[in-house]
Image (cartoon, helix red, strand yellow):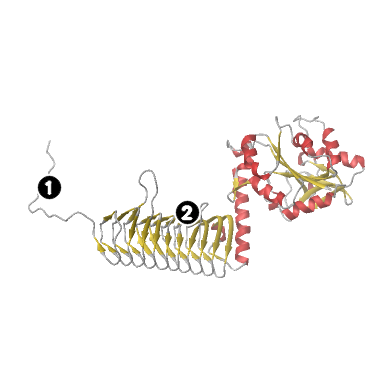
Amino acid sequence: MALNIVIMAAGKGTRMRSNLPKVLHKLAGRPLLRHVMDSAAQLSPDRTVVITGHGAPLVEAAVAADGASCVRQEPQLGTGHAVQQAVPALGSEPGTTLILNGDVPLIAPATARALAHACGGERLALLTVTLADATGYGRIVRDGESVQAIVEHKDATEAQRQIREVYTGMMAAPTEALKRWVAALKNENAQREYYLTDIVAMAVAEGVPVVTASAVDETEVLGVNSPVQLADLERRLQRRQADALMETGVRLADPARFDLRGTLACGADVDIDVNCVFEGTVTLGEGVRVGANCVVRNAVIGDGAQIHPFTHIDGDKEGVRVGPGSLIGPFARLRPGATLGREVHIGNFVEVKNSTLADGAKANHLAYLGDATVGERVNFGAGSITANYDGANKHRTVIEADVHVGSNCVLIAPVTIGAGGTIGGGSTVSKTTPAGALTVARAKQVSIAGWTRPAKIKK
């Protein structure tokens, strides 16, 4: 039987107070809708249908690469009306249609799969959760094990309000029955909207079993309707990720001050201080230490490397690689294409971009290495830079092994500094230098005796 997944993503999200569609607000660095799409993909559905509405072009662009069908709900007249728009895209085969919410991002694939299995193409299955405080939620009213209705909090009797099992807004239904049920929905209510939950009564009336599947916990079924709720869910997710890392042996100085916005793989004995942010795909080797207030994105950090506080590593698409035993920072910046060998030192206020530094190379203070190939054991002095851009094109600087570049030098690319050479402090070098030579390229020092500084003119 076919499995359809319908994701409702049409809402405006008025309480977000934002021009951005609610489902595109980010949780752990990814849009809310992206979390749901990724979970849905793990079920290998025959088709996925995203219902858009507010900000439809933006939402549709965000899922364009997923192969999902998009249908628009304009205007938005309730959850049942939303599913009515999806019906033509569901196909004619018998099977199950699983309905998820684009603003409930942490639904686990296993939970979604269990909900679809509970339906089995024959039953109406509701995803429920048991809450200590169910205020505001629709209660699940049963007759024995059989579900008879969903009663909204405002309509519930005092006895029904004692029920702690609530409806989460997600369900799975036999596809053919769902088509029939939503076509029969009425909007005879104060809001003049079509409610999807009204199909429960239709199923009961037809003798179709109404069953439930249970969410693991409250967090995976929490929706986002405001910045406050988004921030709460962010901390819940970050704590969950932090706990998972600590279970593998990672030492976090304070799991409440840790943010993972991608994937993080860690070797043994990794130590991460407070206020660090990891984005994209990051790998930390054995014994890596990351100091406070660092940002690391798309990077591989080798065994035993130390990333000192306030370092910013951004690999973007090209990535950054830091070799084993290297020391980076504090206040260093590694940009895309930075590839560092073993025991490389990149110190405070040093920036490296699209450059390779071989084993033992050092740039310890106030320097810039862009589009450079740096040999083993090179010492690149404080205040020195590679001038790699001529205003139109980038050019490469090659610094061969065992070169010493003095302080405050400018190496104008394209240029090669020969192995073992020394560049005298304050030099501007625009021509290739021979191996083993001292190269000095600066104006001759002149002292003028008896020189008097200009004086201010008195008014």
Quarter of the rendering containing residue 58: top right
Q: Nearer the viewer, residue 48 or 138?
A: 48
Q: Secondary structure at mark 1?
A: loop
> Which amino acid, by three-letter code, is at mark 1?
Arg
Q: Is residue 215 visible?
A: no
Vertical relation: 17 (above or below) 414? above
Few, some or many residues within 10 Å of mark 1 (<14, 14–19, 20+): few
* Furthest-left residue in this view: 450
Q: Secondary structure at mark 2?
A: loop
Q: Is residue 323 visible?
A: yes
Circle nearer the N terminus (1, 2): 2
- x, y (%) of residue 394? 40, 49
Horizontal arrangement in the rendering, residue 157 relative to residue 311 (left or right): right
- x, y (%) of residue 411? 32, 55
Mark on residue 336? 2
* Furthest-right residue in this view: 207
Q: Which residue is mark 1?
A: 453
- x, y (%) of residue 403? 33, 65
